[in-house]
């Protein structure tokens, strides 16, 4: 079942305007917070956006986030790099991109399992980062990591990708 969810998950860029119930949003956030992180530092926080004005402002500053014009919901992953400083001789320091990536993928898979569409729009480390930070008033010590557009699908892209043995090295 999990492999089928992974195979069927695709980026959705067309959404119906149907609001997403808070209990579904909570399930998405719970899935994110169950992701593994270096030394369990959990270097993230989330901004949940349903305000149409704010979604429009994000479209204005992020050239590839146009689907927010239709999505009724966005979750912004905010990385907290400082949470990994000083932890066990800095063993966790610098792993926040991997940790936030894992939490993001959990959101995408949970949304697919609930029949919702998503589109992951990267922010870190791209040039739009300062503008996204400004729109959402994110402090300088935090990193806007990505914006995830979420909603009821109004398109169903065909699954793509496949297992490619040429990309595997076996050491036996």
Image (tube, rainbow, N blue to C red):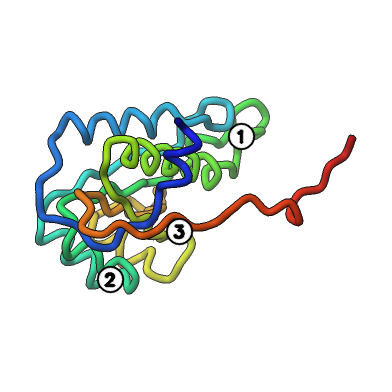
Q: Residue at x 23, y 68 (%)?
A: 59
Establish if 168 lies above or below 115: below
Q: Give the side of residue 151 with respect to residue 10, left or right.
A: left
Foreground label between 3 and 1: 3
Q: Which residue is mark 2?
A: 61
Q: Residue furthest right?
A: 172
Q: CA distance from mark 3 to mark 1?
A: 19 Å
Establish if 14 lies above or below 90: below
Mark 3 touches mark 1? (CB < 8 Å):
no
Looking at the rendered structure, which numbered label has been put on residue 74? none
Mark 3 vs 2, N-terminal side: 2
Location of the C terminus (image quadrant): top right
Q: CA distance from mark 3 to mark 2?
A: 14 Å
Q: Residue at x 13, y 49 (%)?
A: 50
Q: Residue at x 27, y 29 (%)?
A: 27
Q: Residue at x 53, y 32 (%)?
A: 37
Q: Residues within 10 Å of mark 1 (few under 14, many from 20)?
A: some
Mark 1 vs 2, N-terminal side: 2
For label 2, the SS is: helix
Instruction: Please provide percent x and percent y for residue 153.
Output: 23, 53
Q: Which residue is mark 1?
A: 92
For label 1, the SS is: loop
Mark 3 vs 1, N-terminal side: 1
Q: Which residue is mark 3?
A: 124
Q: CA distance from mark 1 to mark 2?
A: 32 Å
Establish if 63 lies above or below 93: below
Mark 1 touches mark 2? (CB < 8 Å):
no
Instruction: Please provide percent x and percent y for residue 87.
Output: 59, 28
The part of the image, by quadrant, that contains residue 119 is bottom left
Establish if 16 lies above or below 57: above
């Amino acid at each position: 079942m999990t492999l089928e969810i992974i195979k069927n998950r695709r980026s959705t860029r067309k959404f119906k305007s149907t609001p997403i119930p808070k209990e579904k949003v909570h399930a998405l956030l719970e899935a994110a917070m169950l992701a593994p992180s270096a030394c369990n530092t959990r270097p993230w926080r989330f901004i949940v956006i349903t305000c149409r004005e704010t979604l429009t402002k994000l479209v204005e500053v992020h050239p590839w986030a146009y689907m927010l014009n239709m999505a009724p919901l966005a979750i912004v992953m905010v990385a907290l790099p400082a949470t990994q400083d000083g932890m066990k001789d800095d063993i966790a320091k610098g792993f926040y991109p991997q940790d936030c990536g894992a939490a993001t993928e959990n959101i995408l898979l949970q949304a697919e399992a609930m029949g919702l569409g998503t589109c992951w729009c990267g922010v870190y480390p791209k040039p739009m980062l300062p503008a996204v930070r400004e729109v959402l008033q994110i402090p300088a010590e935090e990193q806007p990591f990505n914006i995830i557009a979420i909603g009821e699908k109004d398109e169903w892209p065909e699954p793509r990708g496949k297992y490619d043995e040429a990309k595997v090295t076996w050491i036996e």
